[in-house]
Amino acid sequence: MFVGVAVYSRNRKDIINKVWSAVCFSVSLWCLFYFLTINAETKNSAVFLIKIANLFGVLVFVFWLYFVAVFLNIQKDKKFKLFYGLMIAFSIAVSYLILSPWFMKDIVPTYVFNYYLIPGFGYFVYAIYFLFATTGGLLFLFSHRKQFTGIKAGQFNFITFGSLIGFIGGGVAFLPSFGIYFPVYLLILFTTFPIIIAYGITKYNLFNIRVIATEAFIVAIWILLIYRSIVSYSSYQDFFINIGSLILIVAVGILLMRSVMREVEQREKIEKIEKDIEKAYEAEKLAKEKIDAIRVEDEALLSSIGEGVVAIDREGKVTFINRAAEQMLYLKSEEAVGRSYQEILKMETEKGEAVLKEKDPLNLALSSGKKVVTAVAEGTADIIYFYVRKDGTKFPSAITVAPVILNGKTIGAVDVFRDITVERQIDKSKTEFVSLASHQLRTPLSAIKWYAEIIMTGKAGKITKKQKEYLKKLYNGNERMIKLINVMLNISRLEAGKVKITLAPLSIKELLENIIAEQQVDIKKKKHKFTFECPNDLPKITTDSELIRMVFQNLISNAIKYTQDKGKIDCKVEKKDNSILFSVHDNGIGIPEDQQKKIFGKLFRADNAFSHDPQGNGLGLYAAKMTIENLGGKTWFESKADKGTTFYVELPVG
Ligand code: ADP
């Protein structure tokens, strides 16, 4: 009984504690009434007591079976539900039989007992019920044995062992009724079974045995003292002393129980903390191992790739350099790591000039937090940087610098670069080939032009109208081809750095008037409104007139070409401090925003341009930009799709 209270009080909410307490209560009440029966004074009371005892016996099974189910966590299983339902029905039937006259034939003094029953039909059924319930419960336990490990396996062993002992002990109570004398003291075993199980479960952490033991000990002393103070005293003085010491012991007992409980609670807390720390430590160890594995993997990966990789921290100190970078820069990782990147990754232009800090890709990536790419911008004439090796030699490289960003802050950068010497050589031979081919094509095309002109003018004999018309088409096609060849030749020369720049003072106004006059046919054909504005006192500029003519021609003809009929084109020249600014504005088809970045790229044409005018090669602007830059100027544009475009060219006066 006490075990039941103790276990229940440890954790009122836990279902397993509740059911277990119910088992303990019914066992104790069964025992109590059984012992009262065998020690009964009268036959009538014995009859009454034995029935009560056996009713509690039935309850033992009702609760014990449910306890087994809760422990095995099978209370919701169909199989168990069916079995338990049948057993409940059986329990009700047996309880009815216990109360009926068929339960026993008689109750008489047997052996050493005052009374013991002589079984009737009901008692046999009761015995069968006992066998059914115990074997059923034990079978459930055994069939789940394998699923338990660790603490649960320990609890399992105690429950099974305790139940077996208990029911063997309980079973002997039947024997005297069937004429077998047996030391019924074995019944004690029955009462021990809740204790054994409670101990077992406690040992494996479910209830706490230290608290239970302390409580048991203290309550035992209380009962002894109560008994002594009420029953055995010889004087009032004695009585008061007993009562006094009882109160004292109760108080001390409560304090003791509390302190034990607190200590146990603290120990549990410490144990929990210990476990948590252990878990955290394990998790940290695992995470560390994982990070190490990832690092080793990354390092292996970075070491094995062909590109040079150099990582720097926020201060620009080198933190990592891979094998390819070591080989390219003639460096060892040990001498590079920890030093400033400017000492390791010295950078120059092709002409041997140092790269300005504001153009240095690593510095740019660190300060802007954005990716910086050089030498690969889709065919544009990008500046190529050279990395200088330890021995002073240098190589051109395509560089990509990505900032390393953590929580929105740039904490370093990774520079991935590649030696593009070979690519540049191939490019150079390609350019040379195009240059040669274009040059060779020019002569036959000029011959075609010349002869076509002769035939068209009728100098070689009379031709029909139809023939003249076809010849005109031939002539125009040939003209386009010559233009294309000229552009290609120009580009290949510009790319190879072989353009001959002939500088001479030039009047921009005159040049532009000339170009506009040439374009009049097209302007008229498209019915554009064309304006030209230029100050009269514009100084002459020193530049290459042929090159600059090609640029303006291209920009103005583009404005005419990419504007719908009856458009408006404004061409303007302004004087600035040390430069002049040319602009040509149109209200044409514009350049879609997503394609504006690529507009100066080689062979690039915007989608809308292609559908507006299929003829075009996407080389004009590429050549224009390169030319302007070669002449020390700048070019850019502003555009909005379907609204219009303005191209600007700024040229130095000197
Ligand atoms: P092409 O005119 O032969 O296509 P360009 O190099 O001169 O080649 O021009 C490249 C592209 O730039 C054009 O295809 C067109 O998409 C765009 N572009 C140039 N000028 C204009 C303009 N004034 N209005 C709209 N788009 C333009």
Image: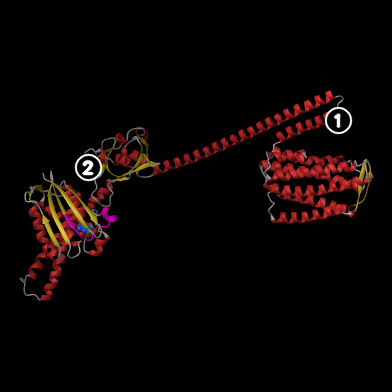
User: What's the magenta region?
Assistant: 584-596
Instruction: Residue lying at the far left in this picture: please name it.
Output: 459
Mark 1 CB near ligand 1 (8 Å cut) = no
Tell me the residue at 68%/31% (across/down): 258
- Is 592 in the magenta? yes
Ligand 1: give its quadrant: bottom left
In the picture, the quarter occupied by the C terminus is: top left
Residue at numbered disc 1 = 231
Q: Nearer the viewer, residue 407 or 374?
A: 407
Between the residue at mark 1 and the residue at mark 2, the CA separation in whole angstroms equals 116 Å
Q: Type of residue at label 2?
A: Glu
Instruction: Residue lying at the far front in this picture: please name it.
Output: 236
Crowding around mark 1 (Cα neighbors within 10 Å: few <14, some 14 to 19, many 20+) is: few
Tell me the residue at 36%/45% (across/down): 306
Q: Earlier in the sequence, mark 1 or mark 2?
A: 1
Q: Position of residue 468 (x, y in %)?
A: 11, 73
Question: Is the residue under label 2 in contact with that under label 1 (CB below 8 Å)?
Answer: no
Q: Type of residue at label 1?
A: Val
Q: Position of residue 243 (x, y in %)?
A: 79, 27
Q: Nearer the viewer, residue 263 or 73?
A: 263
Tell me the residue at 87%/54% (across/down): 100
Q: Secondary structure at mark 1?
A: helix
Instruction: Residue lying at the far top in this picture: please name it.
Output: 237
Residue at numbered disc 2 = 350
In the picture, the quarter occupied by the N terminus is: top right
The colour scheme used here is secondary structure
